[in-house]
Amino acid sequence: MSKEYHHEHHHHHEVSTKSINRLMISFVINMALSVVEIIGGIIAGSVSLIGDALHNTSDAFSILIAVFAFKIGHKKADKKYTYGFKRAEVIGGFVNLILLFISGLYLIAEGVERLISPHLIDGKLIVVVSVLALIVDAATAKISHHHAHDNANMKMVFVHNLADAFGSIGVIVSGLCVIFFDVYFVDGLIALLIAAYMIFQSVISFKPIVHILMNAAPENADLDKIERAIRHIKGVEDVHHIHVWCINEHDVSLECHIKGKDFALIEKIHTLLSEKFEINHCNIQLENKDCCNKCEL
C-alpha cells in the first residue's frame, strides 16, 4: 500500500511574471548595447570594448535562457514528465554557469594579450560608451538581484550582469588612464581581475547545481535524524529504503517504506516531515510484512 502527498506551495521569492517581463526588456536593451559597444570598439580601435560587447552578448543570452527556463519550469506535469518541468530552471542555471566560465576564460586570453601587447585606443570614446554600458548593466543587475539568493538561474543572471558592470568600470578606468596618463596596459590587468571573479563564481556555484541534477539529498537534510523521527511514531515497526532529493531549489521529495499495520501512519509521517523537516512531497509505502530482499536500496 502506498499513498502520495503533493502540496502546492507559493514561495515568496519565486520569480514573478512582472520580473520576467522586465528581464525580456533587459535582454533587448543588452543586445542593443552590445551593437553600440561593437561599433564604438571598432571606431575607437579598442579590443577590450569589443570584448566587453561580446561578454554583454553572453549576458543577454543568459537572460533569455533564464526567461525560457522559467516559462518551461511552470508548465504542468504530463504523462511523460510526471514530475513536471521545475528542473528546467536548474538546467538553465547550469547552462548559464558554463557560459560564465567560458566568458572568464575568454577574458583571461584577452587580458594576457593586452598585458603583453597594449593597444592604442581612443580613451574619450571608450569612457562615453562604457558609462552607458555601466548604467544598463547596473539596471539589469538590480532586476535580477531580487531573486538571486533563492534561484540558481537568476543567480547566474545576476552574476553575469554584476561582472559586466565591473567590466564596464574597468574599461572606464582604462579609458581614463589613456586620457590622463597615456597608459594602455590597464585594460589587460582589469580584464584578468574580472575573469578571476567570473571563474570563481562559476566554480562555487557548480556544486549545488550539480547536486540537484544528480538527485542528491539537500545539504541540510539529515537522513539519520529523519529516520529516527519516523521510528519514534507509535505504530511504526520499521523504516527503510529512504530516498530524499531535490526537484529544484525549493521542492524536496522523499520516499520510503514503512512497516506497520495502521494506514493512518502515512498521514502522521507526512505531518511530521512537513512540520519538522519542511518536506512536503512524500511517497510512503506501508508494508505489513518484511520487505522483499529484492527491493532496490
Image (spheres, rainbow, N blue to C red):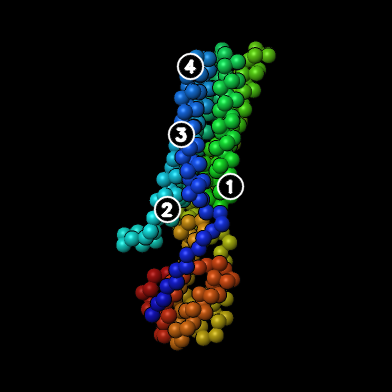
Spatial CA distance of label 4 from label 3 is: 22 Å
Disc 1 target residue: 146
Quadrant of image for the C terminus: bottom left
**Mark 3, residues whose alpha carbon is within 10 Å: few (<14), some, or many (≥20)?**
some
First of labels 2, 3 by sequence position: 3
CB atoms at circles 4 and 3 under 8 Å apart?
no
First of labels 1, 2 by sequence position: 2
Closest to the observer: 73 or 119? Answer: 73
Disc 4 target residue: 42
Disc 3 target residue: 28
Which residue is at 63% across, 15% downward?
178
Mark 4, secondary structure of its residue? helix
Mark 1, secondary structure of its residue? loop
Residue 97: percent from the left, percent from the top? 49, 42
Q: Is residue 97 above or below residue 110?
A: below
**Mark 1, residues whose alpha carbon is within 10 Å: few (<14), some, or many (≥20)?**
some
First of labels 4, 3 by sequence position: 3
Mark 3, secondary structure of its residue? helix
